[in-house]
Image (cartoon, helix red, strand yellow):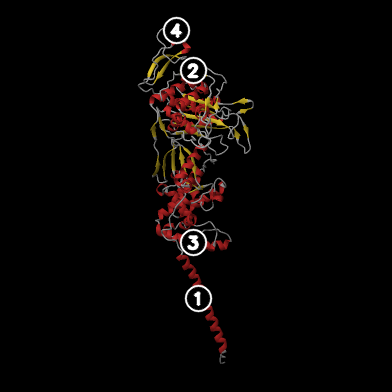
Amino acid sequence: MPRKKRPKRSRTAKRFLLLCMIVLASILVGGIFGIIAAYFQSAPSLEQVNIRQDFTTYIYDVNNRLITDLFRENRIAVDISDTPETLRNAIIAIEDHQFYNHNGINFYALVRAIVVNIREGRRAQGGSTLTMQLAHNVFLTQDKLFTRKFEEFLWAVQIERKYAKDEILEAYINEIYLGHGAYGMEAGAQTYFGKSVGELTLGEAAMIAGIIRWPARYSPFVNPDIAVQRRDLVLNQMVELGFVSPGQAKEARAEEVSLAERRTRVVSAPYFVDYILQQLIHSYGEETVFGGGLRVHTTLDLTLQKYAEEALLNNLPPGRTVDGGLTQPQGALVALEPSTGYIRAMVGGRGEDKFNRAVQALRSPGSAIKILGYTAAIDKGITPADVYIDEPTEFVLSAGNIWRPQNYSQTFLGPLTIREALERSTNIIAAKVVNELGLNTVIEYGKKMGISSFVESGRSNDLGLSPLALGGLTRGVSPLEMAAAYGVLANQGIYVAPISIVRVTDSSGSVLEENTPRRQVVLSEETSYIMTDMLRGVIENGTGTNARIGRPAAGKTGTHQDYRDAWFIGYTPDLAAAVWFGADNPERMVYQGVRYGSWNAATIWQRFMREAVKDTPVRDFEKPDGLVEGILIDKKTGLRVPPGCSLPPGEVREEIFLPGTEPREFSPRCR
C-alpha cells in the first residue's frame, strides 16, 4: 500500500522546532561555558595565593615557663618534617587517598560523593580534596553557597600550581579545626592527648585524623565510643592503602585511649600580661600579636609573682564592695632588679578588673617622696649628722600665703640629725631641707631618678614645698616609677629603665626584638651608699620596722595625711619593690573601725621580700671607697665627740661622710 505523503506544513514545523531546540541548547551551553569562563577569568592570581595562617603567640617568664598564650585560633605551627609519617598517612587515608595523584580536584571522588549523597538523602560522603578543604578554610567564607564549590575548584587549582604537595599538606596539618578550640594537629595532639604530634602513637594519630570530618561528633571527649569506631575506620583505610600492616592496625585498635585532662584556661600574672600586651600591639599590631605565632620572653619570674600575689592579696584591708563589684581598697606591688631594670613581679589590683594600678595609678606618695630631697641634700654637701630643729615653722609660699606644716604625731621633736629626721619621717625638717635646696633642684633629682609625672606649669603644679617635701603631688606617681627610683640607690647611683620584654621572635625563630638594660649614672656611688645607710635605719629603728626581713634592706614609708594612700618602697642589693594600696576613689582608709596606713604596706613588703630573697645568698650593700667613716658625732649638735667625752651612749653614734663634709669642730657639750 503506498505511503501517504506528510503534509509539507508538518515537516516545516518540526524543522523549525528542531532549530529552536538547537538554538536554545546552544544558548544554554554557551551560557554554562560563559559562566565557567567567567569563573576561570576571576580565578585568583598566583600572587594572591599566599597561605597565611594564624598561630598562637606564647609569653614566657624569665625561666622559660609559660605565662599565657594569645590567640584568636589556638594554632601551633609544626613543620611537616616534625610530623610522624603515620599521622600524615592517616590524614591522607581518610580524607584524600589520591592526594599525591591529582592536581587539586578529584572529579571521580566528587561525582561518586554526589551519587551516594543523592541515593541516601544526606551528606554521607565528601568529595573535597585536601587542597579544596585548605582553600575553603584559608581563602573562602564559611557560607554554604552553590558557587562556593566552583570557587574551591579555582583556588585549589591555583594552590596546586604554586605550592608543592608537601607544602600543601603542611599547611593543611596546621590549618584544620579539630574541636575544643584546637586548630591544627599540634594543638589537637596537645588538647586531646597532652603531647606533641611527634609523640603520637598509631592509634592516637588515627583518632585525630578521624576527628577532621566532624569534630563535634568524633571528639573522644564528647563521644568516646563513636571516636573509637571512627579511629578503627581510619586504621582499616590505612591497611587497605598499604600504609600499615594488619598486625600494626590490630595493635593500634588494642591501645588504651588515654586522653589528656581537659583544662580550664588560666592566665597567670594577668596585670603583667596586659602590660606586655599593650607593648606588643603597639610594636606589631593586633593581627600579628594574636595570630603571628610570636614567642615573647619576658623578665617576669613566676615564682616571685606568686609570692607577690599572695603577699598583697592576703594582707590588704578587708575593705568593702562598692558599685560595680570592686572591693576597696585596691593595691599594687611591683618588684624589679635594680642592676638590670628587669620587672620580676607585678600585681595591679585584686584581680577584679583590668586597671593596672602598678603602672596606671598615679597617687600621692606621701613621705616616700622624701628620698628625693634628702638625696639631693647629701649630694649637695649636707651630711647625715647635720642638725635641724623640728619645731613649729612658718613658710612664706610664692603666692604670699603662709604654710604651717604639721608632723604626723602632731608633736615636735626638737634638734634632730638628718639621719634621725629621715628615720622618724618628720615633715618640718623635710620641708626645711627642700626649702634650703630649692624646688627646681629637688625636681631635677626626681627626674634623674626616673620620676616623669611632675607637673611644672599651670595653676596646679608641683613647684611647692608641700608636693616636694610631703608628697602631695598634683598627679602623683606610679608604683613602678617609685620602685625604679629607689632602685637607683640600690644600684650605686645608676638608673636603669624598667624592662619587661627581653626578646621577641617570630614563629620561625627569627629575632624581632631584643632589649638590653639602658643604664645611666645619675648619682655618685658615695651619695647612694649614704642614702642607703640612712634608709636602713628607717627599717631598723624608724617608721619601717614592720619591713624587717633579717638581712640588709633599706626603705621608706609613705602615708597620705588623710590616710588615703599607703606606701612602702624598699630594696635589698638584688631586688627593689614598691607596695601601694588605697581606694580607687580616694577616701580615708578606716575599715571596720581600724585605720590603715604605711605600716600595713611595710608588712606586705616584708612578707613578699622574705619569700622572694629566701633562696639568694645574704649580701650587704656594696660600700664604695673614699667615704670618711668611723667619726663619732654628738647627735644633739652634729659635731665630733673627742676621746674621753662622757656623753650618754644614746646620744653618740659613728657616722659616715662624703670626703670634705665631715665636721671639724668638737661638740661644746664635751668641753
| Relative depth, front residue between 441 and 264 | 441
Q: Nearer the viewer, residue 346 or 161?
A: 346
* Mark-to-mark CA distance, 4 and 1: 126 Å
List the residue tagged with mark 3: 151
Q: Residue at x 50, y 75 (%)?
A: 26
Compared with 575, 668 (above or below) is above
User: What residue type is disc 1 on?
Assistant: Ser
Label 3 secondary element: helix
Disc 1 marks which residue? 26
Residue position marked by numbered label 2 in the rendering: 416
Picture quarter with the N terminus? bottom right
Q: Earlier in the sequence, mark 2 or mark 1?
A: 1
Disc 4: which residue: 646
Q: Quadrant of the C terminus?
A: top left
Which label's residue is closer to the chain start, 3 or 1?
A: 1
- Within 10 Å of the Cα at label 4, are there few (<14), some (14-19), or many (20+) other Cα atoms? few
Q: Are marks 3 and 1 in contact (CB under 8 Å)?
A: no
- Residue sitting at x 53%, y 23%: 394
Q: Are marks 2 and 1 in contact (CB under 8 Å)?
A: no
